[in-house]
Image (cartoon, rainbow, N blue to C red):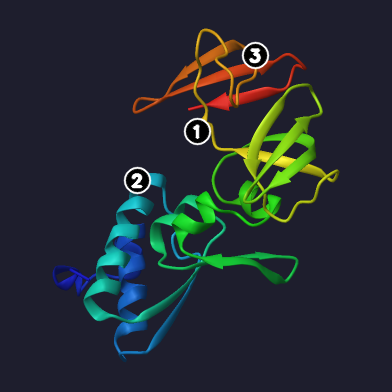
Amino acid sequence: VRLRQFGDRRPTQLSGGQQQRVALARALVFKPSLVLMDEPLGALDKKLREHMQLEIKQIHTMLGVTIVYVTHDQSEALTMSDRVAVFNNGGIAQLGSPDDLYNNPQSSFVASFIGENNTLEGVVDRVSGAECRVRLSGGGELTALAIGVAQGAPCQVAIRPERLTLTPMAAGGNALPATVDGRIYLGDHLRLVARLANDQVLTVK
């Protein structure tokens, strides 16, 4: 864990990241087949937490040990894992790869828990294979993936902010009229606040 030069220091003389490396070394010294980590990076600041995430992944790759990693940070779960189990009410809501959970959530809970979503309420007008047509409560219609829905049933349409595109004029397809209310600059991307005709606010990334 690259701490040889700190061997004579007391715990209070180590940084938060160094203390976490010591804890990791103690867990790995007996070469266990499985390691449980219960929110190990929760007390660290954002920059140090991201650095430690990379270190833990490198150690995992080098040693090949199975790690069960508990976290309430959704982005950390996606970053750290080969497989993610999302728990809800004491049971597993969905188990799969980070990509599968993010792009193919099987419930509204998983869709809202993993990543950021815009949610639109509506009623299923018709189901056609893997897709369905939804009449939105605020007006308009959209085509969406049909996951556990039936014709005539109320439903929620979850749309990731990065999947939305703004155009000057609606050009058919999955399009709704909206007004841009705000613009937030975040360095590597922009966030736009778009307001639908029924005053519902959507985030566009």
Kindly report the distance in space between the C-alpha atoms of the residues bearing marks 1 and 3.
16 Å
Within 10 Å of disc 3 (Cα), the crowding (few <14, some 14-19, many 20+) is some
Residue designated by label 3: 177
- Residue 170 occupies which quadrant of the picture? top right
Within 10 Å of disc 1 (Cα), the crowding (few <14, some 14-19, many 20+) is few
- Residue 59 occupies which quadrant of the picture? bottom left
Q: Residue at x 37, y 74 (%)?
A: 23
Residue designated by label 1: 163
Percent position of residue 156, x then y: 74, 41
Q: Residue at x 60, y 21 (%)?
A: 175
Q: Residue furthest front?
A: 128
User: Can residue 153 be seen in this snapshot?
Assistant: yes
Kindly report the distance in space between the C-alpha atoms of the residues bearing marks 2 and 1.
27 Å
Residue designated by label 2: 47
Q: Residue furthest left?
A: 5
User: Can residue 43 be seen in this snapshot?
Assistant: no
Question: Is 150 left, or right, of 171 in this rendering?
Answer: right
Q: Give the vertical position of 184 relative to 33 (above or below).
A: above
Percent position of residue 24, x then y: 34, 74
Kindly report the distance in space between the C-alpha atoms of the residues bearing marks 2 and 3.
39 Å
The amino acid beneath tag 1 is Arg
The amino acid beneath tag 2 is Lys
